[in-house]
Amino acid sequence: MTYLDELNYAVAVSQAENKLKQNRETKRWQHAMTPLEQRLDKLLAEMPEGLKVEGIKLSTLQRMLKGRWRGNCHPGELGLALRRKGFVRTRKWRDADNGFAALWVKAAL
């Protein structure tokens, strides 16, 4: 391999790495700029039904739905979106293991 071939190869590799990096950045921003309801719909569709019945912590959902508020989804907006999807917040005041817990569960129709 000649020097010119090595140089062309290094440039091609560098360009490919830059393109991958740009694609990752674009995807990250597209995800963050997608409306919350759409991101929540996608997440809930992928989630097992048993987990929805058992209950989900708001903080867990926040971390899974990256957003523009400190890197996470805003908790107030997430609560409203969950209510629109038919979820209700249940509170367990005395749990032997964890103490207080607030979980979001699918409302029984």
Image (spheres, rainbow, N blue to C red):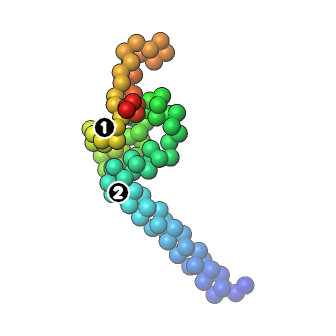
Q: Position of residue 66 (x, y in %)?
A: 39, 48
Vertical side of 91 occupied by 45: above or below: below
Residue at 34% x, 28% y is: 89
Q: Position of residue 38 (x, y in %)?
A: 37, 53
Horizontal placement of 62 versus 13: left or right?
left
Q: CA distance from mark 2 to mark 1?
A: 19 Å
Quadrant including the N terminus:
bottom right
- 19 and 39: which is toward the camera: 39
Residue at 45% x, 18% y is: 98
| Mark 2: secondary structure | loop
Give residue 83's mark. Answer: 1
- 1 and 90: which is toward the camera: 90
Vertical side of 15 occupied by 59: above or below: above
Closer to the chain start, of discs 2 and 1, is: 2
Q: Position of residue 44 (x, y in %)?
A: 44, 44
Vertical side of 5 occupied by 29: above or below: above
The mark lying in front, picked from 2 and 1, is 1
Q: Quadrant of residue 33?
A: bottom left
Direction front: furthest residue: 109
Q: Amino acid at mark 2?
A: Thr
Give residue 34's mark. Answer: 2
Residue at 41% x, 39% y is: 61
Vertical side of 5 occupied by 86: above or below: above
| Mark 1: secondary structure | helix
Quadrant including the C terminus:
top left
Q: Position of residue 6 (x, y in %)?
A: 65, 81
Give residue 13's mark. Answer: none
Whether residue 50 is visible here, answered yes or no, is yes
Please rate how many residues cluster around mark 1, counting C-alpha atoms within 10 Å: few if below 14, some from 14 to 19, many from 20.
Answer: some
Residue at 38% x, 40% y is: 62
